[in-house]
């Protein structure tokens, strides 16, 4: 039998207070992609991707070793992140 799994709308991006715990969970599961949130504004999300990969502007719990990908579904731009390693941060 074919199985169908429907997805809910993605949550908004995590607050600054939630980000260290998310970064720690991703470091504990290297190589696994996780949906961490969405934003309607694609330009703003590109800035988030840049800041997250470099550990800047409220994303200091992340930085080198993290990879990002964006998938667009209608007006929703989803941000996926994984820890690929290569950093002791």
Image (tube, rainbow, N blue to C red):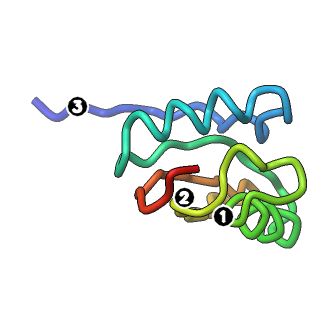
Contact flag, marks 1 and 2 (Cβ < 8 Å): yes
Residue 82 place in picture, x, y as percent: 48, 52
| The disc label shown at residue 53, or none | 1
Residue at screen point 45% across, 33% down: 6
Work out whether mark 2 precedes mark 3 in sequence or the reverse, and give the earlier one: 3
Figure check: 30 above or below 3: below
Work out whether mark 3 precedes mark 1 in sequence or the reverse, and give the earlier one: 3
- Which quadrant of the view contains residue 10? top right
- Give the structural element (helix, strand or loop) at label 3: loop
Residue 9 place in picture, x, y as percent: 65, 36
Closer-to-camera residue (47/86)? 86
- Which quadrant of the view contains residue 85? bottom left
Please name the residue that numbered disc 3 is placed on.
3
Residue 35 place in picture, x, y as percent: 56, 43
Figure check: 68 above or below 43: above
Contact flag, marks 3 and 1 (Cβ < 8 Å): no
Residue at screen point 55% across, 52% down: 81
Q: Quadrant of the N terminus?
A: top left
- Give the structural element (helix, strand or loop) at label 2: strand
Figure check: 54 above or below 40: below
Figure check: 9 above or below 60: above
> Badge 1 local density, few (<14 within 10 Å), some, or many (20+)?
some
Please name the residue that numbered disc 2 is placed on.
66
């Amino acid at each position: 039998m074919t199985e169908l799994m429907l997805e809910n709308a993605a949550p908004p991006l995590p607050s600054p207070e939630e980000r260290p715990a998310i970064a720690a969970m991703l470091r504990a599961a290297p190589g696994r992609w996780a949906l961490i949130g969405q934003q309607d504004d694609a330009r703003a999300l590109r800035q988030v991707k840049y800041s997250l990969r470099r550990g800047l502007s409220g994303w200091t719990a992340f930085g080198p070793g993290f990879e990002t990908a964006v998938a667009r579904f209608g007006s929703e731009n989803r941000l996926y992140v994984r820890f690929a390693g290569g950093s002791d941060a």
